[in-house]
Amino acid sequence: MSTIIIKKLDLDSYNEILTQYKEKIFVNHHAYFRLSEAQRKIYKDSELIQILVNEKPALFGLQQNNRYTTLFSRKEGYFRISFNISKLNIEIVTFYQVDHLPKI
């Protein structure tokens, strides 16, 4: 299964999910695997959670691998955060910078 976004989801759904899980979000240690040591010092768990909770995504969608993904606009490109949702929590599994919004 890939990280291709197969379905665009509406922001109301995103807001409902975040309202339900706002205090139940954590970052999987694997989420940092794409980063250099210098980048790991910049991005901390609390910052990633704050982005997810406080910023409005430019795109919210479902990936082919059944994970959810959000893209947040930045000065240069977009910041992508992918996550799993379970009955208990949201688990951030990866994040990285991309140049443009993907075509769906």
Image (spheres, helix red, strand yellow):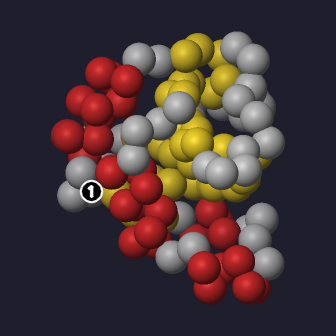
Residue 78 lies, in percent from the top left, at 66, 44
Q: Front-most of 46 and 3? A: 46
User: Which residue does the image show at 67% across and 24% down from the upper left?
Assistant: 5
Q: Front-most of 56 and 49? A: 56
Q: Front-most of 99 and 41? A: 99
Residue 93 lies, in percent from the top left, at 58, 54
Describe residue 68's horizontal placement relative to residue 40 as left or right.
left
Residue 82: in sight, yes or no? no
Q: Residue furthest front?
A: 75
User: Which residue does the image show at 50% across and 54% down from the upper left?
Assistant: 92
Q: Amino acid at mark 1?
A: Lys
Is residue 43 positioned above or below 94 on the image? below
Residue 91: in sight, yes or no? yes
Describe residue 102's horizontal placement relative to residue 14 as left or right.
right
Report the residue marked by disc 1.
24
Describe residue 92's horizontal placement relative to residue 55 as left or right.
right
Q: Please tell me how crowded label 1 is: few (under 14), some (14-19), or many (20+) other residues with Cα within 10 Å.
A: few
Is residue 88 positioned above or below 9 on the image? below
The N terminus, quarter of image? top right
Q: Front-most of 77 and 32? A: 77
User: Which residue does the image show at 72% across and 45% down from the upper left?
Assistant: 77
User: Which residue does the image show at 33% across and 50% down from the upper left?
Assistant: 53
Residue 2 lies, in percent from the top left, at 77, 32
Is residue 32 positioned above or below 42 on the image? above
Per the image, label 1 sits on a secondary structure element best described as loop
Which image quadrant is residue 41 in? bottom right
